[in-house]
Image (spheres, rainbow, N blue to C red):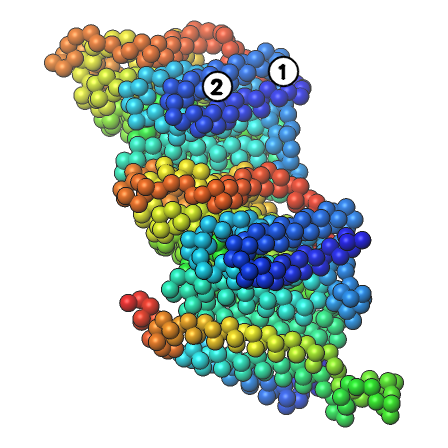
Amino acid sequence: MQAYLSIAPVIAICVSLIAAILIVMSRHYPRLCVGWTIGSAVIKFAVIASMLPSVLNGNYPAIKLFELSPGISLAFKVDSAGMIFGLSASLLWVITSVFNIEYTRIFSWLRDIRYFASFTVCLAATIGIAFAGNLFTLLIFYELLTIATYPLVVISGKPEAIFAGKKYLAYLLTAGALLIIATALTFRYAGTLDFIPGGFLDAGIGSDKLLVLAVLFIIGFGVKAALMPFHSWLPTAMVAPVPVSALLHAVAVVKAGAFGFVRVIGFVFGPTLFHDIGAGTILSIMAGITILISSLLAIGQDHLKRRLAYSTVGHLSYILLGLSLFSPIGWIGALLHIVNHAMMKITLFFCAGAIAAKTRMDRVSQLGGIGKQMPYTMAAFTLAALGLIGIPPISGFVSKLFLGQGALGADLWILLALLLLSGLLNAGYFLPIIRRAFFVPSDMFVKYDESPLLFVIPLALTALMALYFGLQPNGLFDFFKLATDAATSVFAGGIR
Amino acid sequence: MILNHIIVLIPISLLVFSFITFLLGTVRRSLAYPTALVGSAISVACSVVGLILVLQGGPIHYYLGGWPPPIGIEYVLDYLSAFMAVLTTFIGFISIVYSRKSFAQELPHKVVPLYTITLLLLSGLCGIIVTGDLFNLYVFLEIASLTAYALLAVGEKRAPVAAFRYVIMGTVGACFYLLGVGFIYFSTGTLNMADAAKLLPAIYDSRAIIAAAVFIVIGIGLKMALFPMHSWLPDAYTYAPSAVISLIAPLMTKVFAYVLIRMLISVFLPEYLSDVIPATLVIGWLAAAGIVIMSIMAIAQDDFRRMLAYSSLAQICYVALGIGLANPLGLIGGMLHILNHAFMKGCLFQVAGAIRYRTGLTSISKFNGLGKKMRWTMGSFGIAALSMIGIPPACGFFSKWYLMLGSIDAGNWVFVGVIALSSLLNAVYFFKIIEKVFFAQPDDDIVENAAEPPKEMLVPIVIMAVAIIALGLVNVYIVTNILEPVVNHVFN
Amino acid sequence: METLLGSYWFYITTILMAIGLWGMLAKRNLMKKLIGMNIFQTAIILFYITGSSKIGATVPIYDPEIGVANPALYHNPLPHVLMLTAIVVAVATSGVTLALMLMIYRRYHTLDEREIMKRMHE
């Protein structure tokens, strides 16, 4: 593994920032705003994808820009783990920005520079988190992401949106404050913040202090990753427009929290130390409880997007569970689940958006027979939902398989049982929707009336990708190899 | 040749130009503004040259009239004072640019005295910064205070009463300072700061020095409105003219915070104020309490300017917290916050003035939808507000970062918690406005008819907003080149 | 310094200061506040002057009979000079304060603080 100097990571981030400026400048031409969004998304994805081959060869693009505080630089380094997150987020951002065209046409009040500009800044921040070379850089983009998402939540200006925005900020800014404390402590303990595979914190600091530090990190990132009991902002934030929920509340923002755990456990503490001080156990217990409770709560939701939100809460904890397991296999599963869950969940949100745009219905109980009217949409929905339940050969199965193996490898039968149980619960909240859509006759949805193509293509694409990555985990973007590389490098120091 | 005199030129140029402003202004009122502008531009140039000289060749000492200390009065341009001089003159310049339209609307008949006194105020503040003499500092302190009383009194109807209260508290503060200086003089026989710093350690256990330290700290504490000696400030800030307050709010209390730092590092030295008597400990805990209480008070306000005044009180406590920590990183955080807060609060008060100029509104509850009508103004407000909350990479984050590192070094977990908590409290009152301004629909004809302020107001606002981001990104340069030499000098 | 602390002058200036401070902070009438302020400032001037004087010394003007060998025979001139400045400052402060009071009186027709507060909120 070596690093080489490259400004590609900076370009990948700045493309979106420049696009945001262009959007603000062309505020009188909404069409142009859409154009800037798509253009920047494509360039961003191309830049990131161009780094993929060298990353696969273990040759990491890196750059140190300038110091932000004595001894701490604004630094970027694209390693395997960052590549997984960055690539999946930017790929789905391209698809979402296509979805956005039609969505903002139907809901024309969204043709607003605040919407497009915030969206692109969010993506800049997400990629910044993915490619951050040290904890401080990550923290900066993490805070930026929090702020940039806020306008998207409150954009409608309705009282419930304003309330959701307040709740969102209350949770995430508190988390941010704790993270700043944690980062400052880390800097004082270790004298550096640069990510090193296997961690840079020294056990000699004392396990009490480290445990406090770990708890601060768990809360700080856990809020964004919707770890219970810090999850309740996520269902509330579902008042946001569908593309926001789809990309940010299923892929970018919440995964940024999960990815924060990847960095902290793998590159700050190192799995061994994280486990030795007992933080691994704390995290796995919290994640386990979250998986169980969120799935139960999801069953009770009638509002489709809220049901999906609770499902997201659960699946994020799959990732955290995998990371807290002290095993490379579990890590591979967790990293793969970042990608796989993103593909599947974004499909589901797209479907919810397409249905809402067509029928203005957003409750599960209203959707009887919708499969007749929108067969392609519902087919994609079914595919993604089955994937989340864990049915082979859809990609959700692959990551769950590795997570399960990781649990077995760590001799934690209870976690394996939990995973299986949660699969059942997933079925419990997804299958009724599918059954209602296809097998309940209805008077409302009688004739074929599919969504516009600009809806169907994105959601079909993401659904097919979920299937493709289930059949070929190593296809196209080599996510499997990236995950393996990342897990190997983190565990390079060996397992005790 | 003239470079030798650059130190005195900073206050003197302002002093001279205040008289020129008055003379030309009485001839023609329209000449007052350009003269004041030229005067403050010259002072900016002088202080920038001074800073460059200091960065190249180290501190500059200037003996007034050629008399060396301890007999003569010494002016010192070291890293800290050069930095403060640039900050003060620059903010002064920006405020004068900003003030033209605002004065023309609010106080058209008083522009000549206003500009005269404004320059005099800046002269006093610069004098406080560059002097190395304890009594000379008192004189400049009174010049700055008297002019500030006058400027604050010309505002709204209630302003004179607020200014009167300020006079009383300000005079108590100044007299306490003078009393403390008296104790130092009678104990050491010198008024020169460097000389006193040399002589004081021998008599650290004397009761007179304790009295001196206590009087000076309380006196300066009153002047900088350190919690709980702040009661004069909110009214004075709320009712003052917009342009005046956008000059005084960023500078006045900060310069007195600078005096406190100067006393800590150049007169008493930290080992006295933190080890022999627990002064810094008291300052630190008062500041911590002040941050929380004043932030909560700010949340409760509906008048925008009053909210900003309480926010200023909370922010000055950050500087005091840095002083209270009395360790290198804490002090760096405090000093950096003087700079950062001057820009943030300057920007915010200018925005408040611009809103008032265009709409006459001061009540936050009527700000619904202003963001659509005043994009640049409110955009700048957004940046300043996010910086106040401490969102990186705006500059406000970094002073908090250093303060937090300093608190960790001191092992004071309460301070760490207070710094984190205060960010959240700041978020509460700033997002209350952000959500109204950017995401609520206009429900008022006044707002519907609002527009961007004139260029002369808008440009300073935008410059300040850009500076907030830029200062955040270049803070390492400031910290390593200017502030670290200051603390290294003290803590070695 | 110890002799200063032991001397009665010190207690007198302290008492004067306390009176002045009391007047400034506790009196309701603005004019009384101003008078308190003046007493306070005068007390500090007295403090400096008494601190500079010595028993048996004379004014600090060169006297050929005394010579310059023993400075203890002259009063310390520096505090006197400083206090000239302080007096000027005190006068200026009084002037500004009186101007403020004039403004307040014209607006509210009273100098009683409580009355002013009442009329302010009407």
**Viewer-nearest residue: A479 or A454:** A454
Q: Amino acid at mark 1?
A: Gly
Q: Measuring 59% from the left and 88% from the top, which residue is drawn there?
A: C12
Residue bearing the label numbered 1: A58
User: Residue A103 appears in which quarter of the rendering?
Assistant: top left
Do discs 1 and 2 share a chain? yes
Q: Is residue A276 above or below residue B316?
A: above
- Label 1: element kind: loop
N-terminal-most mark, 1 or 2: 2
Marks counted in the figure total 2
Q: Quadrant of the C terminus of chain B?
A: bottom right
Is there any visible trace of residue B177 in the rendered image?
A: yes
Q: Secondary structure at mark 2?
A: helix
Q: Which amino acid type is shown beneath numbered disc 2?
A: Ser
Q: Is residue A322 visible?
A: no
Q: Where C79 sits versus A154, above or below? A: below
Pinpoint residue A239: horizontal percent, then vertical percent: 30, 30
Q: Left or right of B185: which side holds A214?
A: left
Residue beneath the point at 50% across and 27% down: A17
Indicate the quadrant where residue B470 lies.
top right
Q: Which label sits in the foreground, 1 or 2?
A: 2
Expressed as whole percent of the image width and height from the top left, the position of residue B391 reads 50, 40
Q: Position of residue B260 (x, y in %)?
A: 61, 62
Q: Callout 2: few (<14), some (14-19), or many (20+) C-alpha neighbours within 10 Å?
A: many
Q: Chain of mark 1?
A: A
Q: Residue at x 34, y 37 (%)?
A: B439
Q: Which residue is mark 2?
A: A40
Calculate the distance from the C-alpha at mark 1 to the C-alpha at mark 2. 27 Å
Query: Within the image, what quadrant is residue A83 found in?
Result: top right
